[in-house]
Image (spheres, coloured by chain):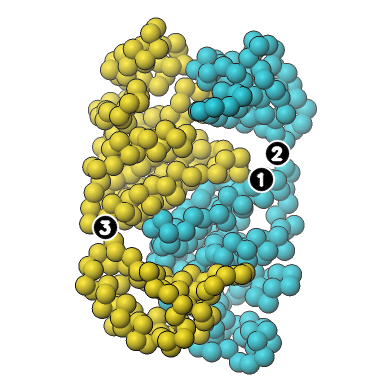
Chain colours: A cyan, B yellow
C-alpha cells in the first residue's frame, strides 16, 4: 500500500502566527484514498533543512507532499530546497513564465519570474482552472501554503493517489479507558492485523472512550468488531457506527 | 536563545481522525516565552520510531516536548519509546502508583499501573491540581494528548522555559505580493538580523499581504520598520500594528 510523508514549510507555523490546516486536510483526503501518511514534519524556511527533509522523505515514502514556500518573496525557498535535495539546478521554465504572462496580459516582473524557476526535470500537472500548475519533482508534489489554493490544487490531482481505502468502525463506550483496556488487548491478540485506537474524552459528553477499529478487509473488520463486542459488558456500549 | 522540538505521537492524527491542536498552542506559548520552536514531527504509535525521533530531537534542541501516547491502552507507547531512546529500563515509579491510589481511593488496576511505569531516572514535576505529574526524562517533557490536560499541564510548568521574547510588528498592504517583494528584499539586506514574513491572503478582505517583522531587540525592530515604511508607496499601507 502506498505511503506518504507531508512536509509543511514555514516559519509562520513554528512561531505560532498561523495554524497549519493543510496537513489535517491532506491526512483526511489521503486516508480516504487508501494512502498511509507515515509522517508530518513542520520545518522553517531554510534551504538546507528543506533539502535534507525532502531527500529523506523522498527515499522513505512513495509520495511526498510539500505545503508552502512557493511564492515570490524572499522567504519562499521550497524550490531552492527541492533543487538542492536532488542536486539539480533551478532553471527558468518557459511554460510557467508564459502562463504568468497569459494570465495577467503582460510579462512577469522580477519577483513573479522567481516563481518560474523550477528544479531541472520538474513535471507540470494542470490544476483545473488555476493558472499555476502543480509542480512534481521525482516523487515530490509541491503545493502552495494558502489553504484555498492547496485544496483546489490537491483535489485537481487527487485521483493519481488512489489505493485501497481503510474501512472504519467506531465503538462509543461509557466506561473509563483503564477499565476496558484489557478487552482491547485481548481483541488485538486475536486480530493482530487490526488497527485499533482508543480515545478518551474529558468534560461533559455522552461517552467516555471512543474505540476505533480499522482494516482494509471488511470481513476481517466485521469479525474483529463482533469479537470485541462479545467481550465488552453490554451496558458499557453506547453505540457503534 | 533556547530552541525546542515538538513531537506529536498518534496514529489518530496521521489518519485524519483527530486534528492536533496541541502543537499550535505550544508554538504560540513558546514564542511568547522567547523559545524558538525549530521543528514539529507527527509520528505514529511505534516504539522504534518514537525512540529515534526523541533521541534526535533531544540532541538537537534544548527542550523537547511530546504530546500523546501516555494513557493506559495498548497504543500508548510514548514511555516505551523514551526509555528505548535513552537505553533506560521502564520501572515502576512508586510515587506515581501512590498518587493513583490516593486519587481514586483504591489500588490501581493493571491498566492503570501501566501508567506508573516510567523510564529510569524520570523526574516528576507537580502539575497544579492534576494528580498525574509532568514527567521529564533528560530534556524531554512528556505531556498527554488530550488538549485540556495538555494545556493545564503546560501552563503549570511554563515558567521554566522563559527566554527573551520576540517583538512583532505587522504591516498590512493593499498591493500584491509580487509588486512589493523588492521592497522587502531591500529592507532585509539593510537589516540582516530581522525576521521577516510575507503572507498573502486570497478571497475577500481589506488587505492583500500581511508582512511581519520580528526581532528580540525593540530598537532594531523600530529602525527596520521605519526603513520598510519609507520604501513602500504610502497608498500601499493600510495599517501597522
User: Crowding at label 2, few (<14), some or many (≥20) Cα neighbours within 10 Å?
Assistant: many
Location of mark 2 (residue): A166
Q: CA distance from mark 2 to mark 3?
A: 45 Å
Tell me if I can see residue B124 in this picture: yes
Q: Are dots 1 and 3 on a single chain?
A: no
On screen, residue A110 versus residue B133, left or right, reads right
Q: Nearer the viewer, residue B6 or A149?
A: A149
Q: Nearer the viewer, residue B226 or A30?
A: B226
The part of the image, by quadrant, that contains residue A184 is top right
Q: Secondary structure at mark 2?
A: loop
Nearest to the eye among marks 1 and 3: give it. Answer: 3
Location of mark 3 (residue): B165
User: Crowding at label 1, few (<14), some or many (≥20) Cα neighbours within 10 Å?
Assistant: many
Relative vertical location of residue B183 with respect to residue B40 in this rendering, above or below = below
Q: CA distance from mark 1 to mark 3?
A: 39 Å
The subunit letter for the residue under badge 3 reads B
Q: Quadrant of the N terminus of chain A?
A: top right
Q: Secondary structure at mark 1?
A: helix
Tell me if I can see residue A80 in this picture: no
**Do the residues under discs 2 and 1 have CB atoms within 8 angstroms?**
yes
Nearest to the eye among marks 2 and 3: give it. Answer: 3
Q: Residue at the spot x=47%, y=59% of the render?
A: A18
Relative vertical location of residue B92 with respect to residue A129 in this rendering, above or below = above
The subunit letter for the residue under badge 1 reads A
Q: CA distance from mark 2 to mark 1?
A: 7 Å
Q: How far across and down, in percent of the image, does residue A197 sit?
A: 58, 30
Dot label at residue A31: 1
Mark earlier in primary sequence (2, 1)? 1
Q: How far across and down, in percent of the image, does residue A23 sit?
A: 56, 53
Amino acid at each position: 500500500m502506498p505511503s506518504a510523508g507531508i512536509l509543511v514549510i514555514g516559519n509562520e507555523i513554528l512561531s505560532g502566527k498561523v495554524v497549519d490546516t493543510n496537513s489535517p486536510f491532506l491526512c483526511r483526503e489521503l486516508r480516504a484514498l487508501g494512502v498511509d501518511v507515515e509522517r508530518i514534519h513542520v520545518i522553517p524556511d531554510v534551504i538546507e533543512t528543506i533539502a535534507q527533509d525532502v531527500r529523506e522523505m523522498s527515499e522513505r515514502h512513495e509520495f511526498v507532499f510539500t505545503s508552502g514556500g512557493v511564492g515570490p518573496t524572499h522567504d519562499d525557498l521550497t524550490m531552492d530546497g527541492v533543487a538542492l535535495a536532488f542536486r539539480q539546478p533551478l532553471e527558468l521554465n518557459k511554460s510557467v513564465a508564459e502562463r504568468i504572462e497569459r494570465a495577467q496580459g503582460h510579462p512577469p516582473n522580477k519577483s513573479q519570474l522567481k516563481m518560474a524557476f523550477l528544479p531541472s526535470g520538474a513535471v507540470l500537472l494542470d490544476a483545473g482552472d488555476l493558472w499555476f500548475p502543480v509542480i512534481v519533482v521525482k516523487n515530490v508534489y509541491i503545493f502552495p501554503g494558502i489553504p484555498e489554493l492547496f485544496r483546489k490544487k490537491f483535489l485537481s490531482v487527487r485521483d493519481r493517489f488512489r489505493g485501497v481505502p481503510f474501512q472504519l468502525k467506531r465503538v462509543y463506550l461509557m466506561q473509563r479507558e483503564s477499565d476496558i483496556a484489557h478487552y482491547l488487548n485481548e481483541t488485538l491478540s486475536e486480530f493482530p492485523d487490526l488497527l485499533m485506537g482508543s480515545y478518551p474524552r474529558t468534560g461533559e459528553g455522552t461517552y467516555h472512550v471512543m474505540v476505533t477499529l480499522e482494516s482494509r478487509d471488511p470481513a476481517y473488520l466485521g469479525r474483529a468488531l463482533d469479537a470485541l463486542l462479545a467481550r465488552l459488558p453490554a451496558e458499557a456500549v453506547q453505540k457503534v457506527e
